[in-house]
């Protein structure tokens, strides 16, 4: 998080050009992908995802964005936020 310009970082985390997420099946791995992204946001790897990661929304970079914004949270809260994101995605495409 750029604490000198937090509004820029928050806006960057919320905006995207294309939604590349797909509707999760009950037994797929999208939740784990979301949580992995969250971990990358909290504990950044040496890898830089670059600006391209912010143009197309995926489950992993959505988790990353929330991890950067909220930091360490319980697994229960991450799952609750993931479920909320799934519901929002479904409602907006209905």
Image: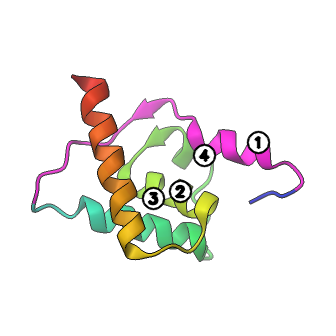
**Disc 4 target residue:** 13
Q: CA distance from mark 2 to mark 4?
A: 8 Å
Give me the residue at 27% from left, 41% from top: 87
Magenta stretch encompasses residue 9: yes
Assign the N terminus to one quadrant of the image.
bottom right
Q: Is residue 43 left or right of residue 79?
A: right
- Secondary structure type for disc 4: helix
| Visual colour scheme | rainbow
Helix, strand or loop for disc 2? helix
Mark 2 Cα shell of 10 Å, populated few (<14), some (14-19), many (≥20): many
Q: Which mark is residue 63?
A: 3
- Of residues 81 and 47, which is closer to you in this image? 81
- In magenta stretch: residue 50: no
How far apart are the two marked residues, 3 and 4, measured between alpha carbons? 10 Å
Circle 3 residues within 10 Å: few <14, some 14–19, many ≥20: many
| Residue 25 % position (x, y) | 12, 52
Judging by the rendered image, the residue that carries numbered circle 2 is 66
Which residue lies under the disc numbered 1? 8
Sooner in the amino-acid sequence: mark 1 or mark 2: 1
């Amino acid at each position: 998080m750029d604490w000198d310009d937090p509004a820029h970082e928050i806006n960057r985390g919320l905006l995207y050009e294309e939604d590349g997420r797909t509707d999760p099946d009950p037994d797929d791995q999208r939740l784990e992908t979301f949580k992995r992204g969250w971990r990358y946001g909290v504990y950044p790897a040496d890898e830089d995802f670059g600006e391209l990661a912010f143009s197309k929304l995926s489950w992993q970079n959505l988790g990353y964005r929330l991890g950067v914004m909220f930091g360490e949270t319980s697994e229960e809260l991450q799952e609750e936020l993931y479920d909320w994101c799934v519901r929002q995605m479904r409602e907006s495409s209905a």
